[in-house]
């Protein structure tokens, strides 16, 4: 029973990591690429870690894998937000078809 | 055996992310691509540890996750306020 849950998690994680990697390459500007990076980390890497952790039954290995997955899940939004804010402050342009920029409106 | 195929898929995603890290027009683009590469690298370390049942690889993955978080924050602080350059 637990192996089939692990297989489902590994399948969803593989699909999400490949789709997110293609999105990082294909998206038009920096802020859209941050969105694709979130798909890679939370949808791809975290589900891969959970699936690999429970693929061999429940033991101490599972606990360590869940701890690493939780750490990545908590710290990645912090670093992505810091990076996007730094890029906006240093003047990275939005895509020409983007419609709204709330941070720029707040600065004025 | 299925873990090895998942490992191959994760390495393929790392290679696709590396394309953007090489091409990226600005420095934050490269940093976002490197963020994805480090997350997939941590996941592939955990998968390899689950395949060989080596618990030491999980300790390496935990330290790598901590160092990549601190490194991304330090580089974001360094990029803040600099102009755009390629």
Image (cartoon, coloured by chain):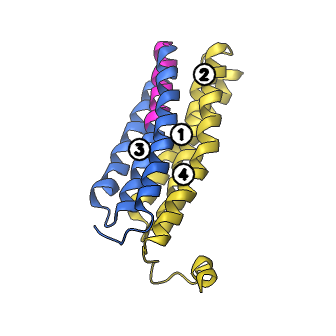
Q: Which chain is drawn using blue?
A: B
Q: Quick check: do tags 4 and 1 share a chain? A: yes
In which quadrant will I find the N terminus of chain A? top right
Chief SS of the magenta region: helix
Q: At 45% from the left edge and 31% from the top edge, which residue is drawn?
A: B44
Badge 1 density bin: few <14, some 14–19, many ≥20, Cα 10 Å? many
Task: Name, please, the residue furthest toward the right.
Answer: A1
Residue identified by numbered label 1 = A45
Q: At 52% from the left edge and 81% from the top edge, which residue is drawn?
A: A98
Residue identified by numbered label 3 = B37
Residue A55's label in the rendered image is: 2
Q: Nearer the viewer, mark 2 or mark 4?
A: 4
Residue identified by numbered label 4 = A79
Q: Nearer the viewer, mark 4 or mark 3?
A: 4
Q: State yes or no: discs 1 and 2 in contact (Cβ < 8 Å).
A: no
Q: Which chain is drawn using yellow?
A: A
Find the distance from the CA under tag 4 to the CA under tag 3. 14 Å
Of labels 4 and 1, earlier in sequence is 1
Where disc 3 sits, the SS reads helix
Find the distance from the CA under tag 3 to the CA under tag 1. 10 Å
Left or right: residue A68 versus residue B44 is right
Of labels 1 and 2, earlier in sequence is 1
The residues colored magenta run: B41-54
Mark 1 falls within which chain? A
Whole-percent x, y for residue A37 in the image: 50, 54
Q: Magenta stretch: residue A91 in it?
A: no
Q: Nearer the viewer, mark 3 or mark 2?
A: 3
Q: Magenta stretch: residue B48 in it?
A: yes
Q: State yes or no: discs 4 and 1 in contact (Cβ < 8 Å).
A: no
Q: Nearer the viewer, mark 4 or mark 1?
A: 4
Find the distance from the CA under tag 3 to the CA under tag 2. 23 Å
């Amino acid at each position: 029973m637990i192996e089939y849950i692990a297989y489902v998690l590994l399948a969803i994680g593989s699909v999400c990591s490949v789709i997110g990697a293609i999105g990082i390459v294909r998206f038009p500007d920096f802020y859209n690429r941050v969105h694709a990076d979130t798909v890679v980390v939370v949808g791809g890497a975290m589900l891969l870690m959970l699936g690999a952790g429970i693929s061999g039954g429940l033991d101490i290995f599972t606990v360590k894998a869940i701890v690493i997955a939780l750490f990545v899940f908590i710290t990645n939004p912090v670093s992505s937000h810091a990076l996007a804010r730094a890029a906006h402050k240093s003047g990275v342009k939005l895509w020409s078809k983007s419609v709204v920029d709330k941070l720029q409106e707040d600065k004025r | 055996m299925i873990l090895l195929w998942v490992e191959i898929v994760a390495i393929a995603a790392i290679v696709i992310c590396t394309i953007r890290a090489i091409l990226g027009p600005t420095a934050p683009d490269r940093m976002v691509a490197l963020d994805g590469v480090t997350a997939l690298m941590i996941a592939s370390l955990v998968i390899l540890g689950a395949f060989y049942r080596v618990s030491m690889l999980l300790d390496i993955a935990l330290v790598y996750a901590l160092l990549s978080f601190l490194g991304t924050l330090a580089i974001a602080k360094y990029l803040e306020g600099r102009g755009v350059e390629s």
